[in-house]
Image: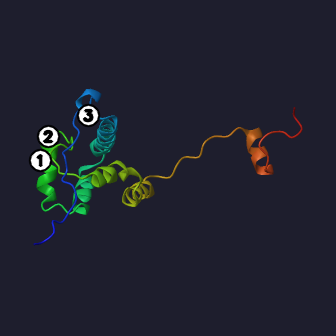
Amino acid sequence: MTAKRGGRKSRGHAAKEPQPEDYKSEVAYKDAMRDYRRFRAAQRVWKQIEPEERLWLLQEFRYKDPIAALERDTARGSDLQELKLTKKKLKDIGKYPRSKHRRDIYRARLAGSPPRKDIRVRKHEKRLQEAGLRRPYGGA
């Protein structure tokens, strides 16, 4: 007899906010609320990122056919309901804006943009900056 592999099966996404009367205990309700907040955070990020980045994330999650999954999700309005995602994957999507991959994309975009214009500074402020000061010394 072989042991069953894997953990708990996904209970699906918390598409609507849980109500306390739907749960037998306060602990179960708090767990459901935590899952719901995690899902909503991932959903907000998912709607804001580019389709290329979504495809990259699905490939990172090792989807069998990430292009078809992305098309199904886009057809439903990019609401994450169509995708089978675990808690960890939802958390990864929610934290994606702070990921190294996203930072690299942002840096490349900044490097390709024109340099920032120099802001105008008043003459007396420029003299103070050149002297290493910010404002006249000795004022009260």
Q: Are marks 3 and 2 in contact (CB under 8 Å)?
A: no
Quick one: 60 or 26, which is closer to the camera?
Answer: 26
- Could you give the CA–CA distance between mark 3 and mark 1, rounded to whole angstroms? 35 Å
Q: Residue at x 36, y 52 (%)?
A: 96
Residue 132 x/y as whole percent: 79, 50
The quadrant of the picture occupied by the N terminus is bottom left
Quick one: 31 or 63, which is closer to the camera?
Answer: 31
Name the element at disc 3: loop
Residue 119 x/y as whole percent: 60, 42
Question: Sequence order check: which comes first, mark 3 or mark 1?
Answer: 3
Q: Are marks 3 and 1 in contact (CB under 8 Å)?
A: no
Q: Which residue is mark 1?
A: 72
- Using the image, determine if residue 54 lies above or below residue 79: below
Q: Are marks 2 and 1 in contact (CB under 8 Å)?
A: yes
Q: Residue at x 38, y 50 (%)?
A: 97
Quick one: 6 or 89, which is closer to the camera?
Answer: 6
Which numbered disc, 3 or 2, marks the residue closer to the eye? 3
Q: Which residue is mark 3?
A: 24
Using residue 133 as the reference point, say whether residue 32 is left or right of it: left
